[in-house]
Amino acid sequence: MAIYLTQESKVLVQGMTGGEGMKHTRRMLAAGTDVVGGVNPRKAGRTVDFGDRAVPVFGSVAEGMAATGADVSVVFVPPAFVRAAVTEAADAGIGLAVVITEGVPVHDSVSFTAYAKARGTRIVGPNCPGLITPGQSNAGIIPADITKPGRIGLVSKSGTLTYQLMYELRDIGFSTCVGIGGDPVVGTSHIDCLAAFEDDPDTELIVLIGEIGGDAEERAAAFIRDHVSKPVVGYIAGFTAPEGKTMGHAGAIVSGSSGTARAKKEALEAVGVRVGRTPTETARLALAVLEGEA
């Protein structure tokens, strides 16, 4: 099994005809994703040739869903248009919208994540690499060739660290890897993924990657204590980050003693999560847990 994304998922790409949309649609198709259409009202009625696959372009998400049965949208539109794109997808009743775009205004994210939730649409992102269920489907920009299907579930704020842990643990493989994004406001949290992996019979171990800023990891620790029976291994990026300086992601900022890597590490370790000091150490801890050595 998997969480959120399976080989049955039918994917629309909002912004497919742009440069990034074209590039990553081609990569998603190569990974086996069932991309059933693109959305661009100015190019509706055309098809785009991706080698052996001609993908139709629809004028709206609702039109694409009606024609294809799509249940997932991947959003590759400029920041100023993300709110409208997600609102359109939610109004159409899409089940999952994966927002890849970086630089989305926080007030827009607050608005469209609440709007989508009220209409039953799950948002992954914004400013995220998307999610992949290896061997089944890939919605976003995660490289599909660095791992294989397996027993680990991964949830991460960082795209780059998602890729590194996928590669380091490639011999074991993953059920699903979810890059939730590092903005201050995101649609899917660590807790959402922890709950889904806890219920997934094919996930034996969960890897949680966090970073400085906010209290998402502390809240995840409380959830693990009360609701997660599977082993969890963690990594927190930012032990050397200076106070008051944003590091990489818009949400990665330490203010005084709040949001530090040390505080997050201690909160996770207090509920039995083994936390590595580096990605490589984290991968070793995960292997040790799976092999019964920890």
Image: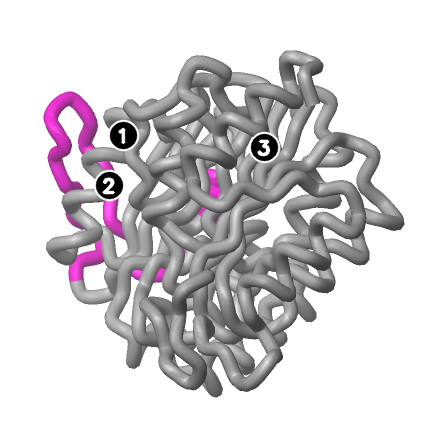
In depth, the one of 106 and 10 nearer the eye is 106
Instruction: Say the numbered circle drawn on residue 185.
Output: none
Marks 3/1: CA–CA distance = 23 Å
Q: CA distance from mark 2 to mark 3?
A: 24 Å
Which residues are the magenta region? Answer: 43-72
Quadrant, the N terminus: top right
For the residue marked with disc 1, what is the amino acid?
Leu
Residue displayed at 64% across by 70% down: 215
Q: Where's the C terminus, which quadrant?
A: top right
Q: Secondary structure at mark 1?
A: helix
On the image, the x and y values in percent for residue 221 come to: 74, 54
Image spot of residue 270 (x, y percent): 78, 51
Q: Please identify, in this view, whether the residue under mark 3 or under mark 1 is nearer the observer.
A: 3
Q: Which residue is mark 2?
A: 25
Label 1, on which residue?
29
Depth check, front residue: 200 or 18: 200
Asked if marks 3 and 1 touch (Cβ < 8 Å), the reply is no
* Amino acid identity at mark 2: Thr
Q: Residue at x 35, y 71 (%)?
A: 247
First of labels 3, 1 by sequence position: 1
Check contact, mark 2 vs mark 1: CB within 8 A. yes
Is residue 88 one of those drawn in magenta? no
- Numbered mark located on residue 153 in the image: 3
Q: Residues within 10 Å of mark 2 (few under 14, many from 20)?
A: many
Q: Secondary structure at mark 3?
A: strand
